[in-house]
Amino acid sequence: MSVPRQLRLYGWTLANMRRQQLLGVVKRAGRNHLLPRLPVDIDERYEAPPPSAESLDTEPLAAILSSFDTSLCEERISEYRQRAREAAAGRVDLLNMTVDVSGDPIDWDPPALDELPRLWRLKLHGFEPVYWLVMATSPADRDAREWAATFEMWIADWLDRYPVGETAYLRGAWTPYAVSKRVVNLALLCAWQAAGGQPPGRPIRAALQKNADFLAENVEHDVGGNHVVENGVALTMAGSLLPQGATYWDAGLSTLSDAAKDQFLSDGGHYERSPMYHAQVLWGYLTVLDLCTRIGRPYPEVIADTAQRGMAFLAALTPPDGRIPLLNDAVFGEAPSLDALRSYASQIDRTGWDYGAPLCVDQPQLALPDTGYYWLGRSERDGLLIDGGPVGPAHLPGHSHNDLLSVLLWVDRQRVVADTGTFSYKPGDRRQYARGVAGHSTVQVGDREPIELGRRFLMGERSAPETAFQSGSIDAFRGAYTAHCGYSHTRSAYGGENWWFVWDRVCGAGTDSIRSRLMLHPDVSVTGSDSPPIAVTGPDGDPLVWVSPLRTDRITRTDGEYFPRFGEARPRDVLELQPAEGAEAFGYILTTTPPGDVTVTTDGTEPITLTIGSTTVEVPTI
């Protein structure tokens, strides 16, 4: 990236950051770079005698662990148990990437980490293997107790190796995100051990106290977003466990209350617009609500309201296959499923909350207007989801993608048109592909990005689409935006019974080519792409949907990649449509049965009627 472009993107990012973020950046930079140079022992500030094992109130967290256990499916429990076993043997699997950390007792900095995303290291320093242990095993299990003994040696070694105040400590082992993970996992380990009649060891208690003290002074207001929620959950959990923990408790609840008011939109969605992060922070709010209920302490009503609305949002967004759509930075396996969240929430003693009830698929919520997600032609087994919202909050572009007006499609509960997911947060071609317009089922003009991208988290000037939506016998959506580079894109989409119609108009493209893409799921494939309609077949080889282009010059199959988990790339088919020469608008129809002849009549640019075989329908005007 050129220096002028980088400066422009940094300038735009800084201009949109909030005052609290900017103050947090200054505070962190000062502590990170100046404090290690002073002739003082910063670590000594956080050294205190650890609380006694008898003074820890482990019963509420032990009960919550039991609820966690009953909420997870057998597959996830088996996966966690296997990971804990492998980790205790020195092979840690994080972000779908395994590293040998065996040492005496552990190698915290093996050379392999230099090639991995920074998040891998933060998760290791967050003691994530401890989480697998407590979530998937019983303290009565002899093998599990041996693994716990190994992890306790890791914790003692970590305390000796990583004092507070080393150079760049706030970007390394003492990054507050990693501290939050440590606090949660240490607290859960204390409860797990105590439930098995084994008092938590001194290294665990000392590490918990030290990390809680540190986190209370280093909430990540400079980062914001889901990190602040993680901080609040960790502080509340520490406050429930440690003697004289009222300070942590109050700070945690205050942090979570402020985050709930700021980060959750009116439709219940989290403002970063990532279903993965939504599920993660929702799990945190449910955990804190459960903790408050079990202890009998009062809590701000906004926390309960956020959990309830967040559950309703996720239920409405969850597609026919029951797994989150991979919108923005999202992958499978990093957040609890909707079923797990429902199961856990149903166990919280809160009268009137019917989280365990199944989603009503006969009348699903079609519009989530604040986040900008809309369902068209939704049924129990099928549905097209369109992203009509802004890419994310202007002050927090890190997890946003160039997915303006992109579509996703499920037919017979099979993902057909699927978003790209996320390979890694590490800079590189795959990070750029996942975030860029070329990785989404929308329109691209030339090689331009509708919002300028830089490095792994930067984004430039943007505008949110203006949208309209109505539901009925034919669901209708219209969205329009103007890109920073001058062109404008309007997309109309309609959903009927067993068909969906997408219609695009681009102005200001100049001589640049225009392409509309359909990013197919790896489990489906294109057959007979020489002449439309093009059949897309499922895993069994039977057609799932037919694609009929309208007013296009050509439709071609190209290669793409799909990132369902961190570190995993799968090849897939991509269909590219180009408008016919002179066409001011173009589009395509998706049908679940062979469509026969397909035509559209327009008033010049806007569709009026649509003919699919022998059926002609009037296109709604919105």
Image: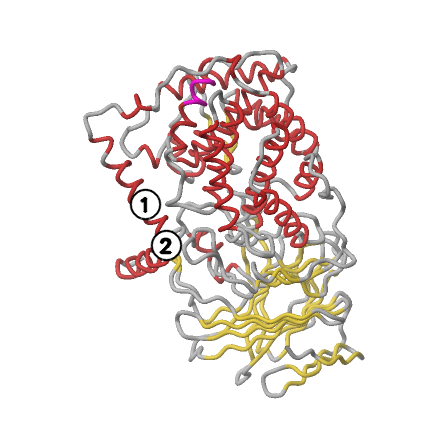
Task: Indicate the amino acid at tag 1.
Answer: Val
What residue do we see at 47% from left, 40% from top?
255
Quadrant of the rendering where the N terminus is positioned: bottom left
Which residue occupies the foreground of this view, 503 or 237?
237
Residue 499 in the image: x percent, y percent?
Answer: 73, 69
Q: 218 left or right of 554?
A: left
Residue 205 in the magenta stretch? The answer is yes
* Tags 2 and 1 touching, CB below 8 Å: yes
Residue interval drawn in magenta: 204-209
Disc 2 secondary structure class: loop
**Residue 17 image label:** 2
Mark closer to the chain start, 2 or 1: 2
Which element carries disc 1, helix, strand or loop? helix
Assess disc 2: are there few (<14), some (14-19) or many (≥20) residues with their C-alpha within 10 Å of its C-alpha.
some
Quadrant into which the C terminus falls? bottom right
Q: Nearer the viewer, residue 481 or 382?
A: 481
Q: Residue at x 53, y 18 (%)?
A: 56
Q: Looking at the rendered structure, which numbered label has been put on residue 244?
A: none
- State the residue position of label 1: 25
| Image spot of residue 536 (x, y percent) | 69, 62
Residue 317, image x, y percentages: 65, 54
Q: Residues within 10 Å of mark 1 (few under 14, many from 20)?
A: some
